[in-house]
Image (cartoon, rainbow, N blue to C red):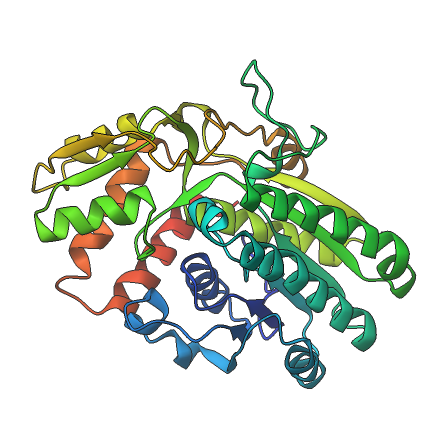
Amino acid sequence: MFKESKFWNKKKILITGHTGFKGSWLSLMLYNFGAKLYGYSLEPKKNDLYVRAKLKKIYQKSVYADVMNQKKFKIFLKSVKPDIIFHLAAEPLVLNSYINPKKTFNVNLIGTLNILESIKKIKFPKLVMIITTDKVYQVKKNNPFYKENDSLGASDPYGTSKACVEMLCETYFKSFFANLKIKMSTLRAGNVIGGGDYSSNRIVPDYLKSLNQKKNLILRNSTFIRPWQYVLEPLYGYIKLAEKEYKNKSVNYSVWNFAPKKNNSVSVIKLIKYFQNSKYNDYKVKLIKKGNKKKIKETHVLKLNSKLVEGYLNWKPKYNLKKTVDRILDWNSQVKRNNFFDVSINEVKNYLKNNLV
């Protein structure tokens, strides 16, 4: 289906949150396939990958605005009339959801509502892809690999906001989009990691900052287990799914997990040991373990099951944790000597060269 496909060539794709970490890598991958890109996002910071790689040049048009501004988004949507929307714009951090829960719910839930309302009124596009999170699930004591039909019910404000987003999306599909022949999918990935993430209070950016500055690394919740996955893995899955759903004659609402390899679900401290032991690591960062003084409640163990999408798409995660860490460190090393855009687009091309199916 996908290897020889010209499907994306000149397709008009609108990405919300295109200036963010995942949005930037999704942009590069879609650009590589020949898509015409349109972006709606907050203005990027000067250290973001979007700025460093000068990704504005691959966009037909970028609007820097908040998803809370429905009027502005509606005008932009009407002017673009995209074939597909990827909705990534979000308040993405669990820690921030405890500091400012109102903002998290406003951006994630009301922001998504504004997107859906605009789509309902404009009656575009044909397909909407909503990116949520693995943190939407109701926690179970036996630490299962969560499946798509497991109950929603997160333990933190961020996860709850995203669970609400999923309920909102399903309601809008059943109430409005089905009649308008607009398809919609919600996509749940694990803890996505990769080069170009400069966020605060995330373990991999914090480690790379410590590595680059030769400073100590403070670990919070070092025993927590997460499904770590290389950023291009789920993004490639999203793209494959979007193509198949766009071509699908049925008008459906669907939910999909995109998980890493099972052995990639390890503790924070074990992940860091992979970094410390990588052949691309040139400095032994000193680790300082600290407890959760702010008493922030997070799920201790998170694992995902993606058998459903693996069967539907013939998609599977390719990178084990060693390969994932090696690619991150190699990218981090290369951008110190070379152009950010060239290094990043080559990373995409090399991934696709080895993984297109």
Image coordinates of residue 155 in percent, x first then y, are 57, 33
Relative to 158, is 256 on the left or the right?
right
Residue located at (45% from left, 25% from top): 300
Taking the view exactly as shown, the residue that stands out farthest to the right is 179
Q: Quadrant of residue 66?
A: bottom right
User: Where's residue 247, x and y in %?
Assistant: 74, 57
Q: Position of residue 38 (x, y in %)?
A: 55, 76
Horizontal placement of 191 versus 160: left or right? left
Determine whether, in the image, residue 204 is placed left or right of residue 229: left
- Residue farthest to the front, as pictured: 294
For residue 216, above or below residue 44: above
6 vs 227, left or right, is right
Q: Residue at x 46, y 61 (%)?
A: 29
Q: Residue at x 37, y 38 (%)?
A: 294
Q: Residue at x 69, y 47 (%)?
A: 164
Q: Which quarter of the picture shows residue 281?
A: top left
Residue closest to the eye, 189 or 12: 189
- Residue 36 showing in the rendered view: yes
Q: Which residue is more in the foreground, 189 or 323? A: 189
Pick out the residue farthest to the top: 142
Relative image position of residue 217 (x, y in whole percent):
18, 40
Can see residue 314? no
Task: Relative to 290, say whether 144 is above or below.
Answer: above
Q: How many marks?
A: 0
